Image (cartoon, helix red, strand yellow):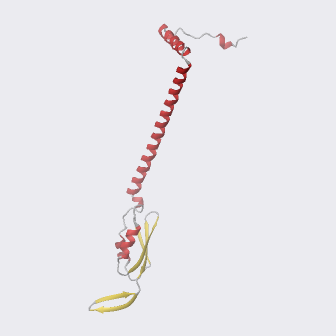
Amino acid sequence: MRPPHWNRQTNTSRISRQQRASRLKLNNSRRYQSRAAQEDQGRRHVQWRRVIRIIAKTAVLLVLISAAAGGAVWASESPLFQVSTVTVVGNSTVAEADVAGAAAVLGQNILLLNADQAAERVRALPAVKRATIYTKPFQEVIISVEEREPAALWRVGSTNYLEDS
């Protein structure tokens, strides 16, 4: 016995004769295709899938690269990462303002800050023996200074000269 849905007739009255004929031709052409033609059509289908997959992966990669570049530009220009506080540690004879002025880090972006160059500028001060620069997230720079110990002091006129060991 047949299931009840097999006895249903499809409503073909809504389809025009031309549409029925074109569907019949399409079905017949598919039915009588050679095995090689059917396999070739399947290969083309797989090739298109590969092309679409490659395009999708490329689009995702471009979105990720542009997001990373935009984030880098934002971080380099954001006031959130600008140095607002400079703390000098270890100074007794050299003024804190002189050390901070020589370092010239106030207002720079902390992510782009070259600590070695700033430390060299601080070491160029006559009373500074060593200088090390540390950064603290997000807006603070700490400059650690070791001053020279004078071994000799002499005065010529009104000018004092210090000699370290």
Q: Quadrant of residue 80?
A: bottom left
**Quadrant assignment for the N terminus:** top right
Residue shown at the point (38%, 70%) measured from the top left: 118
> Is residue 50 shown above or below 106?
above
**Quadrant assignment for the C terminus:** bottom left
Give coordinates of residue 81: x percent, y percent.
42, 60
Which residue occupies the foreground of this view, 56 or 107? 56
Name, please, the residue furthest toward the left.
157
> Is residue 51 shown above or below 10?
below
Which residue occupies the foreground of this view, 49 or 145? 49
Total marks in image: 0
Q: Quadrant of residue 113?
A: bottom left
Name, please, the residue furthest toward the right.
1
Residue shown at the point (37%, 91%) measured from the top left: 152
Q: Is residue 100 visible?
A: no
Give coordinates of residue 121: x percent, y percent.
35, 73
Residue shown at the point (51%, 31%) measured from the top left: 49
Q: Is residue 130 visible?
A: yes
Give coordinates of residue 100: x percent, y percent.
37, 73
- Side of 32 where 80 appears, left or right: left
Name, please, the residue furthest toward the front.
36
Give coordinates of residue 36: x percent, y percent.
54, 21
Q: Quadrant of residue 42?
A: top right
